[in-house]
Image: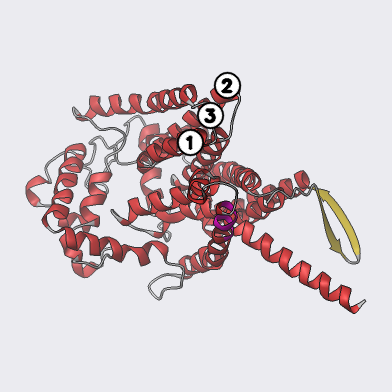
Amino acid sequence: MNTQVSQYSIRVFDKNYTFSWQIVLLLIGIIAILVRLLSAFYQGNTVTILPGIYDQVSYDSLARRVVDGYGFSFAENHWPMTQAGEPTAHWSFLYTLYLAVLYFLFGPQPLIPRLVQSVIVGGLQTYIIYLIGEKMFSKSVGLIAAGIIAFYIYFIYYSGALMTEPFYITAILYSLLVAIQLSENKSKHTDIKLGIFLGIALGITVLLRQVFLLFIPFLFLWIWMARFKRGFRLPLVSTVLALALLLLCIVPVTLYNQSRFGRFVLLNTNSGFAFFWGNHPIYGTHFLPILPEELGTYQDLVPVEIRHLDEAALDQELLRRGLQFVIDDPKRYILLSLSRIPAYFTFWPSSGSGIVSNLSRVGSFGIMLPFMLYGLFLAIKRTVSEKGNPIINLIISPTGLLLLFTIIYSSIHLLTWALIRYRLPVDAALIPFAGLAIYDLYSRINKRFALTKQKQV
């Protein structure tokens, strides 16, 4: 789709008002920020336990300790099994520092970081998703995608939460955008600039959540394949720059962890806990996103003989034992992983969830999923119909990248631990396809209406 529309008309009370696409995008961005600010005010100046955002309690406590001069530690025994006063690397250092800086400047007022990140992500997410939609399809699709993400209830809700999700999803979207731009670039000078942008974006992303590290090799592989198949110069310089900047973000954290734990910890100490708990034999072959009380607590599952280990050593030992679960019974692991699919892709209301959770679930993913799937179908159909090998066309296209991200990122969580909030980056990556679907349906309806009107005349 190459149709580019520069003017948009809105009819109100028998009058037509014409706006440029820039004005429309600006209005969408302002609305996105305003509704996110409302979410921030709703969550308030205290940190309480709300559905799906319990981690904000930990980030708030940790940031307060950093400001008070105690470093990255908790005053009391804390999740997952961190002892009081002992070092922790379970939580994102970058996001904790974001909170700590604002707490240091304005006092421990949770509403301040809620408002700041609501403005940042409200503006950036709408603009970035517009750029992705515009580059893949058209300005109109980009604007529709921006409108979708502006009103996507999950993103509105999480924008005010003191957690990594708002910035993390934004950083992922920007990483995907720069990757698309880099795959189509022919200029050596622009290659260098895009390599720098990509390295910074990837660095921020993994400092927020290290799980994205597992996708990065696939990202660079896609960029190289796309450039190679298009006959462009291979992006060697930009790749080296991006990886160098990524390492520059990771190495200081690794050295800091080494100094505190006396052992290698790349970024965070959470992969072992997640893999051990997510694949424990207590589930059998049916995964439960949240362990019910009748099965005890997650801490109860940790063998007594290793509970004395510090957080880093315990994380690594739990990862080893979790992998042993897989080796001991691979069939159970496969069935358990398959059972995580409903938990990961849930879009229907549940009697076990509150009104906020059900409203967010149905009002965002539940409504948009049919459009996402239809738009993905349209994009694949158009891509494979282009001149050349249809499979290669799909693989090296932006559609191929977003589909690759959806598959790889979802697979990572289906093989480890699946929660609805872990799927939110995938929701964001699928929104341009929802925009395409809505634009296509609107065009079909408009065309049919015009034909009907023409026949009447």
Q: Nearer the viewer, residue 253 or 441?
A: 441
Q: Which one is earlier in the sequence, the residue at label 1 or at label 3?
A: 3
Q: Is residue 382 magenta?
A: yes
Name the residue tied to disc 2: 188
Q: Which one is earlier in the sequence, the residue at label 1 or at label 2?
A: 2
**Is the Cβ of the residue at disc 1 closer than 8 Å to that at disc 2?**
no
Name the residue tied to disc 1: 223
Q: Which one is earlier in the sequence, the residue at label 3 or at label 2?
A: 2
Q: Nearer the viewer, residue 36 or 443?
A: 443
Q: Amino acid at mark 2?
A: Lys
Q: Amino acid at mark 1?
A: Ile
Q: Which residues are magenta?
A: 378-383
Q: Nearer the viewer, residue 112 or 262?
A: 262
Q: Residue at x 27, y 29 (%)?
A: 257
**Separation (CA) of disc 1 from disc 3:** 14 Å
Q: Residue at x 47, y 32 (%)?
A: 101
Name the residue tied to disc 3: 197
Residue 305 at x, y = what percent? Answer: 6, 47
| Main SS, magenta residues | helix
**Separation (CA) of disc 3 from disc 2:** 14 Å
Q: Residue at x 41, y 70 (%)?
A: 353
**Is the Cβ of the residue at disc 1 closer than 8 Å to that at disc 3?**
no
Q: Is residue 316 left or right of residue 42?
A: left
